[in-house]
Amino acid sequence: MTSKKSFKARVRSRMDKTGEAYTTARRQLLARSEATTPDRPADPPAGLPPATPSPAAAAEQTERIADALLRDRTGRGWDEWFGLLDDWQATARTHTEIARWLVTVHEVPGWWAQTVTVGYEQARGLRAPGQRRGGGYTAGGSRTVAVPVDRLFAAFADDGLRTRWLPDVEVRVRTATAPKSFRADWAGGPTRIVVGFEPVGETRSRVAVQHEKLTEAEQAAELKAYWRERLAALKQFLEADGDPR
């Protein structure tokens, strides 16, 4: 009971400082708590086998992407992919080698090859949730929106449209390839966003955002919550406005 009261007091304190609603402040504090809890044990001494990753580390990507959805898009579920990758001795390979193998040998689409690769690396303790293999962190999210892919792409690439759902942020575009990808420096750097787009039929499409070059787990947790909110706002904006142009 005492811990619950203490947590509620922290939520209200954050609300006073940031002006956030109770649910937003609570979510941010929970995300921060999760980010500061180690998901991956320390590396073992030389000559000893690696420690088993914690359930939280193994579950991050596999819980975010349902097994049924992965099977529909790639032809296999998580356990099947993990078994194939283990047989291929993927723990000794780099991230790029794993993803390329999935694309070239098993014809997995690029975005889904990355998804399987990250899930495997987390499950085998090669990276913590949100962390890249070489260190550093990423954050982001994905959404399926009931608009064609070209309109979803325009919501990022068109300055006027972007400010309607992503206000008060300086975005310096690096590359924009319609309607497939969008890359930009974020708030003057050094972080950046990499965005991919995928049609889901003629009237629906999917966007996936990766916010890269983050240096701390806490920063990654905050941006993960941020992108969850912003992508929800994007979905509402596009689906409610009819033709946003």
Image (spheres, rainbow, N blue to C red):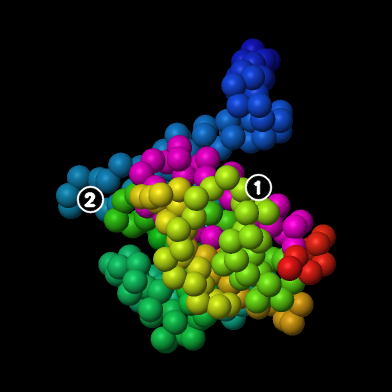
Front-most of 18 and 55?
A: 18
The spot of residue 241 in percent (x, y) is 81, 62
Image side of residue 207 versus residue 188, left or right: right
Query: Which of the image's four quarters has the N terminus?
Result: top right
Image side of residue 73 versus residue 218, left or right: right
The spot of residue 68 in percent (x, y) is 67, 69
Query: Which of the image's four quarters has the C terminus?
Result: bottom right
Magenta residues span 209-238
Q: Identify which amino acid the numbered label 2 is placed on.
A: Leu
**Which tag is nearer the camera, tag 2 or tag 1?**
1
Return the residue found at the far top: 2
Residue 229's disc number: 1
Q: CA distance from mark 2 to mark 1?
A: 43 Å
What residue is at 44 percent from the left and 76 percent from the top?
84
Q: Identify which amino acid the numbered label 1 is placed on.
A: Glu
Indicate yes or no whether the magenta region holds residue 125: no
Predominant secondary structure in magenta?
helix
Count of number-bearing discs: 2
Residue on which disc 2 sits: 48
Front-most of 47 and 53?
A: 53
Front-most of 15 and 87?
A: 15
What residue is at 52 percent from the left and 65 percent from the top?
195
User: Which SS class for mark 2?
Assistant: loop
